[in-house]
Image (cartoon, helix red, strand yellow):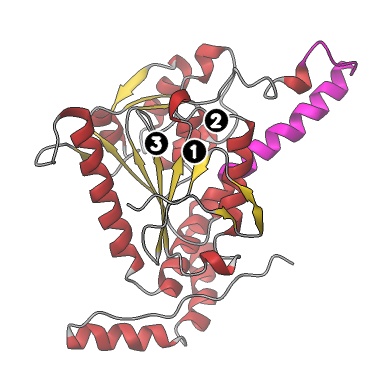
Amino acid sequence: LIMKTKTHPMNENYRYLSLSVPVSAKTILVVSLDRPRKRNALNAAMWKEVGMLFRQIGVSPQYCPCRCVLLIGNGKSFCAGIDFTDPSFMAPLSDETELDVARKGFAFESKLQDMQQAFTDIEQCPVPVVAAMHGNVVGAGIDMATATQVRLCTENTTFSVREVALGLAADVGTLQRLPKVVGNQSLVHELCYTGRSFSAKEALEMGLVSRVVSGEGGSSSGTAGAHEALLREAFALCYEISQHSPIAVHGTKRALLYSRDHSVQEGLEQIANYNRLALQASDTQTAFLAAATKEAAAFCDLPPRSRL
């Protein structure tokens, strides 16, 4: 991976403070959470920048070639949750403000909705987002992970829905998305009520991750070797996704998200409406020809989406 931090695509004077956006390949965007000394705990800057970045994918010409996003964490962990040492996090509820209780609640609600939207922006990104997780994935780290579409981890990764142990209910996505990701509702309730840690093996068994990667055969041993192997395998997966028609992949993601929250019949109607246009694209003919000739297909990028 070639590490090179990008400026914000709509503002060349803005440089990300908490994210590293390397240039890895034309069609794959590798986004790194970049607060390694804090184990990538989310502060105000990271919340803001995650939403800013993912809203631009598919909109900014700079990111139009992107057909898959790989989300990783720099340092020893993917994400250790919320950074409660950030004074701005609880500022709306501070006793130092002159606001009454109702107005404090109103101010905090607005902040919380912005935090929720940052992860929804990951989920609604027009291309698949693959999370490659290692170390600790705690609290808001799970909120973030469940907003991605494919999740991989190393065999020594540890997870925890930790919020209840901190005196609050998870409120930025875990309680809404985790039950739909994991088939075992009893286990979801257990994890969310107890805040206990669970292993990569358990995460695989429940369906939170689709692969657990070991360090066997890597260039180094132990944790570092496992992390290297994880990044290689995750990048290979992103590359495989990126070789398919962007119209087909976008339509598939859109239909899967829609069907999650709608009936089967509504989902069938949605994909029929999408494919009546998508099947007229040149991509279908290109894919059939590539399959017949056993050659790699070349697909055009999707145009930027309007934000009007």
Task: Report if residue 211 is visible in the image.
Answer: no
How crowded pointer 1 is (Cα within 10 Å; few <14, some 14-19, many 20+) is rated as many
On the image, which quarter does residue 256 sit in? bottom left
Residue 253: give x, y in percent of width and height: 45, 61
Please, is residue 290 above or below residue 180 in the view?
Answer: below
* Residue annotated with mark 1: 144
Q: Report which residue position mark 2 lands on.
A: 42
Across and down, in percent, residue 277 comes to 52, 82
The mark tally for this picture is 3
Q: Amino acid at mark 2?
A: Leu
Highlighted magenta segment, given as a residue range: 94-119
Local secondary structure at mark 1: helix
Residue 104 among those drawn in magenta: yes
**256 lies above or below 197:** below
Q: Position of residue 21 (x, y in %)?
A: 47, 50
Residue topped by disc 3: 74
Q: Do callouts 2 and 1 mark residues in contact (Cβ within 8 Å)?
A: yes
- Depth check, mark 3 against mark 1: the one in front is 3
Q: Amino acid at mark 1?
A: Met
Marks 3 and 1, the one that precedes in the sequence: 3
Q: Is residue 276 magenta?
A: no
Frontmost residue, 207 versus 227:
227
How many residues crowd around disc 2 within 10 Å: few (fewer than 14), some, or many (20 or more)? many
> What secondary structure predominates along the stretch shown in magenta?
helix
Q: Earlier in the sequence, mark 3 or mark 2?
A: 2
